[in-house]
Image (cartoon, rainbow, N blue to C red):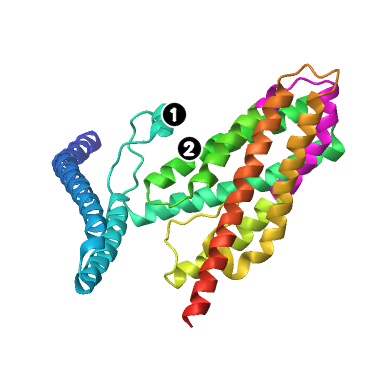
Amino acid sequence: MSCGASAADCLREWQELQDGYQRIQDNHKLYKQKLEELTKLQDGISSSIARQKKKLKELSLSLKKCKAHVSPEQEESIQETQSLIKERQNVFFEMEAYLPKKNGLYLSLVLGNVNVTLLSKQAKFAYKDEYEKFKLYLTIILLIVSFSCRFLLNSRVTDAVFNFLLVWYYCTLTIRESILINNGSKIKGWWVFHHYISTFLSGVMLTWPDGLMYQMFRNQFLSFSMYQSFVQFLQYYYQSGCLYRLRALGERHNMDLTVEGFQSWMWRGLTFLLPFLFFGQFWQLYNAITLFHLMQHPDCKEWQVLMCGLPFFILFLGNFFTTLRVVHQKFQNQNKDTKRK
C-alpha cells in the first residue's frame, strides 16, 4: 500500500514538473522572440542615429560657410541652430551608450567581436564602480610590493614579480577602459593612451636582465613606483569624493572616472594635487635623463636602457603638457568670465 502511495506521489510530482517545464519552454520561446525584436529595434535606432549624425555634420559645415554672408538676424538664427546641433550630438552620445556598437581595434584584437555594451544604468554603474575599486586595491598592492622590493628584498625574481604585476595591471586597465568608453565614459585620449605606454614600459622592465645597468637604475625606479602609487591613491581618494559631489549637483556624468592626471572638473577643490602631479612628471623626466646617461656608459649593452628611456620621456611630455593645457584653459576661461562681469 505504501509502495502504491509512493508511486502515486512520484507520478503527481512528475506531472507538476511537466507543467512547470511547459511554462519554461513557453517563456523561453517568448524571451527569444522579444530578443529578436530588441535586436531589430537596436539596429533600426543605430542606423537612424548614424543617418541623423551624418546629416547634422553636413548641415553644420553648410552653416559655417553661410555665416559670413548673412544678415545679423540670420546670424543669430544660425548660432542658435549650431548650439542645438551640439546639444543634439550630446543626446545621440547618451543614446548610443545603450546601443550595441562595434568594438574598437584594441578590443577587437583582445576580445574579438563580442558585444560589451551594458544595457542598464545599474549594470554600467556597477562595472564603473568595480573598475574604480580595482584601481584602488591594485594601487595599494603595488605600493606595498614596491616598498618591499626597495627596502626589504633585493632579488631579481621579486623585481620580476613586481614588473609582471605592473604589466598585468596596465593591460587590464586598458581593456576595462575600452569597455567603459563603449558604455558612455568620456575619458580624455591621453589618459587612456598613457596606459598603453606604461604597459610597454613595464614589459621592457620585466625583460631587463640583472646586471650593472639594471642595478644602477633599480632603486630609482622602485622609489619612483612607490611615489607614483602614493599619488594615484591620493588622486583616487579625492577625485572620487569630488565626482560624487558633482554628480549629485548634476554637473558631471554618472560614467565619469577618476584619472591619473588633472582635468578641468578638478579645478574646484583639487588644485592642491597639482604640485604632487608636477613633481611626479618631472621625476619621469629625471628617469629618462638617467637612462639616456646610462646609454653612454662603456658597459651598457642592453637594449632595454633606450627602450625604457624613451617611454619615460614620452610619458613626461604627454602628462606635463596635457596638465599644463588644462590649467592654461582654466585660467583663460576665468579671465573671460572676469571681463564679462
206 magenta-colored: yes
Mark 2 vs 1, N-terminal side: 1
Residue in the foreground of this view, choosing between 243 and 198: 198
Q: Which mark is residue 74?
A: none
Q: Which residues are magenta?
A: 204-229
- Give the left or right position of residue 234, taking residue 325 as reference: right
Q: Residue tagged by mark 2?
A: 175
**Do the residues bearing badges 2 and 1 touch, measured as CB atoms within 8 Å?**
yes
**Disc 2 to disc 1, C-alpha distance:** 8 Å
Residue 35 location, x and y as percent? 19, 42
Residue in the foreground of this view, choosing between 1 and 25: 25
Amino acid at pointer 1: Val
Residue 276 location, x and y as percent? 72, 56
326 magenta-colored: no
Residue 220's place in the image compared with 83, above or below, is: above
Mark 2 Cα shell of 10 Å, populated few (<14), some (14-19), many (≥20): some
Q: Residue at x 71, y 19 (%)?
A: 303
Q: Residue tagged by mark 1?
A: 110
Location of residue 330 (image quadrant)? bottom right
Main SS of the magenta part reads helix
Residue 189's place in the image compared with 206, above or below, is: below
